[in-house]
């Protein structure tokens, strides 16, 4: 996996974790338990897909080079939209180090770091979204996705089923979250 992809994954997983923590405070324990099970299954399936993807990249130097080129293209576009991925990654690493530091961090300091983290994530996502609007990047992204999925299917015969499972779980999680978000409105 490339540095940018790893960085984006870290930010996405952290945001997903924060969403999950907030969601877990939901209206019913049964609803939370079901969603937690769905999210656990989703994580397991995506981890299996990531393992297949990493093995596929390792065994396909041409695909690895194509991904690296695409990664560079996206970073360059993000930079033109005002976000430097390398500098952003250093800022996030500094935030994580501050939270992991052996010293006790005050609640106010932790809140400040989390707000900075969220602002960093927002800036990164805004620049990435703008970069992804570029027609050349859209075309290249579609091509690399097709190449990756085809190579993953050759690498491991379970890929097709895992992709179907992940999509089904994503749909169920989104429906559960929509139901959860609607619940307070009904009560109020």
Image (spheres, rainbow, N blue to C red):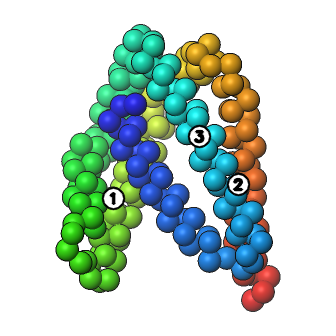
Percent of width and height locating residue 37:
70, 57
In whole angstroms, how far apart are the C-alphas of marks 3 and 1?
25 Å
Whichever of labels 3 and 1 marks the residue nearer the N terminus, that label is 3
| Mark closer to the observer (1, 2) | 2
Relative to 107, does residue 102 appear above or below in the rendering? above
Q: Nearer the viewer, residue 51 or 145?
A: 51
Q: Is residue 27 left or right of residue 99?
A: right
Res 109 quadrant in image: bottom left
Q: In the image, 85: left or right of 188? A: left
Residue at 27 percent of width and 48 percent of height: 89
Question: Residue 172 shows which numbered tag?
Answer: none
Relative to residue 181, is residue 185 depicted above or below? Answer: below
Going by the picture, which residue comes out furthest to the right?
186
- 116 in relation to 139, above or below: below
Q: Mark 3 falls on what kind of element?
A: helix
Estimate the spatial distance between the alpha carbons at disc 1 and disc 2, rounded to whole Å.
28 Å
Q: Nearer the viewer, mark 3 or mark 1?
A: 3
**Mark 1, secondary structure of its residue:** helix
How far from the left and from the top, in percent, is residue 147? 55, 17
Q: Residues within 10 Å of mark 1 (few under 14, many from 20)?
A: some
**Residue at 24% from the left image edge and 43% from the top image edge:** 86
Query: Image quadrant of residue 45?
Result: top right
Label 3 crowd bin: few (<14), some (14–19), many (20+), radius 10 Å: some
The residue where tag 2 is placed is: 38
**Circle 1 sits on which residue?**
120
Are there few (<14), some (14-19), or many (20+) residues within 10 Å of tag 2? some
Closer to the chain start, of discs 3 and 2, is 2
Q: Badge 3 is on which residue?
A: 46
Whether tag 3 and tag 2 are in contact, CB under 8 A, the answer is no
């Amino acid at each position: 996996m490339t540095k940018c992809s790893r960085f984006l994954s870290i930010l996405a997983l952290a945001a997903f974790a924060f969403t999950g923590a907030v969601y877990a405070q939901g209206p019913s324990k049964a609803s939370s338990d079901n969603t937690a099970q769905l999210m656990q299954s989703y994580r397991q399936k995506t981890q299996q897909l990531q393992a297949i993807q990493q093995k596929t990249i390792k065994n396909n130097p041409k695909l690895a080079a194509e991904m690296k080129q695409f990664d560079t293209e996206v970073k360059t576009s993000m930079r033109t939209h005002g976000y430097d991925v390398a500098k952003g990654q250093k800022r996030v690493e500094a935030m994580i180090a501050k939270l992991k530091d052996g010293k006790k961090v005050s609640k106010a300091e932790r809140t400040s770091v989390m707000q900075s983290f969220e602002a960093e994530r927002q800036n990164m996502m805004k620049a990435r979204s703008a970069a992804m609007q570029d027609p050349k990047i859209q075309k290249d992204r579609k091509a690399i996705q097709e190449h990756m999925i085809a190579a993953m299917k050759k690498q491991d015969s379970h890929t097709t089923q895992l992709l179907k499972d992940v999509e089904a779980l994503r749909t169920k999680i989104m429906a559960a979250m929509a139901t959860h978000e609607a619940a307070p409105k009904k009560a109020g």
